[in-house]
Structures are given as structure tokens and as C-alpha cells.
Image: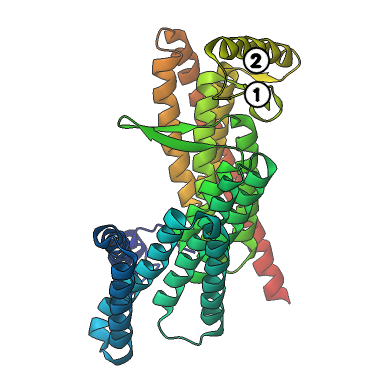
Amino acid sequence: MQTVADTARLVEDGIITSEQATTIEARARETMVSLAINALLCLGIIAATGGFIAWLGTPASVAITGLLFLGMGALLLAYGSELFRMFGNASALIGAGMLIGGASLELMSKYEDLAGATMSAGGFIIASASAWLLKSDRVSARFVTGSVMLMGLAMHLVGIAFLLNQADATGAPITVFFLYTTVAVVAAGWLTDVRLVTALAIAPFAQALDTSTFYFDAAYVFYSPEPTLSIIQMAVLIAGCLWIAAHRPERMARHARVLAVMGFVIANLCALVGSLFGDWVGQAIWGPRYPRDPTLTREERRMAWEEFQEAQDIWRETALFVSPDLYSVLWAAALVALIFWAAHKSQRGLFNASVTFAGIHAYTQFFESYHEEPLAYVIGGIAAIPLAWGMWRLDHWIVAKRDLTLSENQRQEQSA
């Protein structure tokens, strides 16, 4: 388990030696440098692959250039020294990316009737074969094999999405697709042991309830049509991930922890939406829908909108509404509890995220809800003081109880 420790203080307290502290610091630096190098390498490969496909333009030139890069990479990996292995990995992956990505773009632009089925089947074969090679330890170029598996998986998922789009699918098939994508991405992240891939699984999982983002006019927007249900969805994910992190080996646990943090981020963004606008629970799923028919005339659209508004008012008479004020209070209470729990359990990711969103919550509510109500800050500030004292006393009680349990266990071992 990775933790934050002050090595200088540990040496002063006599817990570790200065040599051990030096080793710990060197390994921490090695990990950070490795992350930086791999991130730069992956970004370079992705950018070069996409740039070559767009620049060359024709299928033949993309295929020939891709094969040349792939062949050159294979030669470097097979006969080159360890010093040039990174160049072999990059060349092989640029070539594979050009072949897979170029073929996918060509299919979608020129052979729409075949594209969906061909990409979903072809991507599945590539991903499955690469996964089998990874699991069987039959290849030494594991970085290249894992990356090709991810390319095949992307091709497979894009092919399924293309088929659903052609069929104008809505509702349950879309939800099933997003959940399938979530499982596939998590499995790929665990198999390659790349936590960044696992973290990406939060995007399709959130979209199962249409929680997503979009961009327009230099503005990035997060939207959640069902914030309450999305928070419950993310809470289930977080609970499951924390259970896995506590009961499974570290290799699996670290993926569970990063996915838990991503779920926590989405849950807090949904809470932010709820604290600003409230939530009619289930309206986007079970409520009336406005018919978006482009063939309607202006008068027909006006009448359809009025009918939709009337149906919505009727539906809301029996629906559950969570007000923005209630959301704000519940969100603040949850963040306080989570900050204390994460600190006590040494859940560094959840602790940092909780503190960050506590700041966002305070900043947002100051400008949106309580900027003209100073009494609210008086009440909140005074209430925070005994709350902090209670958390301090609770922590002392928990530590004392833990120490007592350890002492009893040690006495039992000595008597045995």
C-alpha cells in the first residue's frame, strides 16, 4: 500500500535508518519519473498516429507507412539493444495504430453498411488475441502487446456504437452498451495493470444514466439529468471498490482505489448540480418526454411544448423533489464525514478529493445561495468548532481502542 510519510522525521524518531530513508526516497522518485516518461511516450504515440493518418489521407499510403513503422519497430525490438527499446515500442505502436485506426476510419467513411459489424468483430479478435498473449506470457514486448489490445478494444467498442447509431437505438440497449464498455475497460486496465485505463471506465459508467460533459464556445460543461440516482450509482461503485481494495491483492486493490476516487469525483459533481438546481428524482427516466420531431411545423412544435409542460406538471405532483438547500446541507455533511473517515483510514485519494470538493462547495454556495445571508456563515462557523472537537475526541477513542486490541493480541500470542 502506498502511503505518505515524512522520512526525515522517521529517521529522527529512530524508526528507520538514514540509508533506508534514502532508499525510500529514491524509489519514490523512480516511480514519479517513470510515470512522467510513460505519459509523454503515450501522448507522443497517439499524436503521431493521428497526425500521420490525417496527413497522408489515402488508405494505401496510411497502410504502407503503417507497415513500415510496424516492421521497423519489430526489428528494433528483436535485434536492438535495451538502450533503443523505447524507439522500437513507439515505432511498432505508431504502425499498429495507423493500420487499426486507418482501417476503422476508412470503413466508417466509405463502407457504412459493413463498418459496424467488421469493426466490432475485428476489434474483438485483435483484443482477445492480445489478451491471450499477455496472460500466457508468450511475448517479451508486453508494452506493445497491451497497447495493441487497447487499440483492438477501442475498435470493437466503436464498431458496436456505430451499429447502435445506425439502428437509432435508445433506452435500454444504450445503457447495456455503456455497462458493457465499463466492464471491458476495467478488465483491460487490470490486465495491462495501467490504472489510467481503469480510471477511464468511469466515463461510460456515468453515461449509463446520461451523466456526461460537452464543450461549446470555450466552455466545458458537466451535466447530470438525474443527480440523485447518479450519486446512488456512484456510491454503490465506491462501496464495491473499497471492499475489493480491502480484501483483494494489491495489484487489484490499486485499480479499485483509483476507480473509487473517480466515482467519488463524479458523485460530487452530481451533488454540485443538485445543490444548484435541485432534483426531480426520476424525471429524465420516467417523466414525460418532449417529442423532438424535425418534421413538425412551428405551430405543431408550440402545441407539443405546451402539452409536454402540462404532462410534466402533472407528473411532478406525485414525484419526489430534493430542493437545492437540502442538497447543499446533505452534501456538506457528507463531505465532513468523508474527510474524517478518509483521514482515519489513510485513503489519500478520497481525502484529497473530499477537501477539494469542500472548497468548491463553499465557494459555489457563497456566490449562489448565501452571499447575502451572513447569519448562515455565523451558524456554520460556530457549529464547525464543536464538530472539530468531536472529531478530535472520536479519533482519540478510535486510536485508544485499536492500541488496546493490539496489546491484547500481543499478550495472547505471548501466553500461547
Return the residue nearer the eye: 142 or 75: 75
In terms of image quadrants, where is residue 157?
bottom right
The answer to the question of whether label 2 and label 1 lie on touching residues, with beta carbons closer than 8 A, is: yes
Residue 182 visible (yes or no) = yes
Residue carrying label 1: 289
Furthest residue toward bottom:
79
Q: Quadrant of residue 402?
A: bottom right
Query: Is residue 185 positioned above or below 318 on the image?
Result: below
The amino acid type of the residue labelled 2 equals Phe
Q: Position of residue 209 (x, y in %)?
A: 61, 38
Q: Residue at 61% of width from left, 36% of height from top?
A: 230
| Residue nearer the viewer, 347 or 124 | 124
Side of 112 relative to 100 (left or right) = right
Query: Where residue 131 sits in the image (x, y, percent)?
Result: 54, 75
Q: As shown in the figure, which amino acid type bears the numbered disc 1?
A: Arg
Which type of secondary structure does the marked residue at label 2 adopt?
A: helix
Please give left or right for residue 284 compared with residue 112 in the image: right
Residue 24, disc: none
Question: With respect to residue 412, does 46 lie above or below?
Answer: above
The location of residue 322, given as percent across then percent down, is 64, 20
Q: Give the residue at x 47% y 66%.
A: 150
**Tag 2 residue:** 308
Q: Residues within 10 Å of mark 1 (few under 14, many from 20)?
A: some
Mark 1 element type: loop
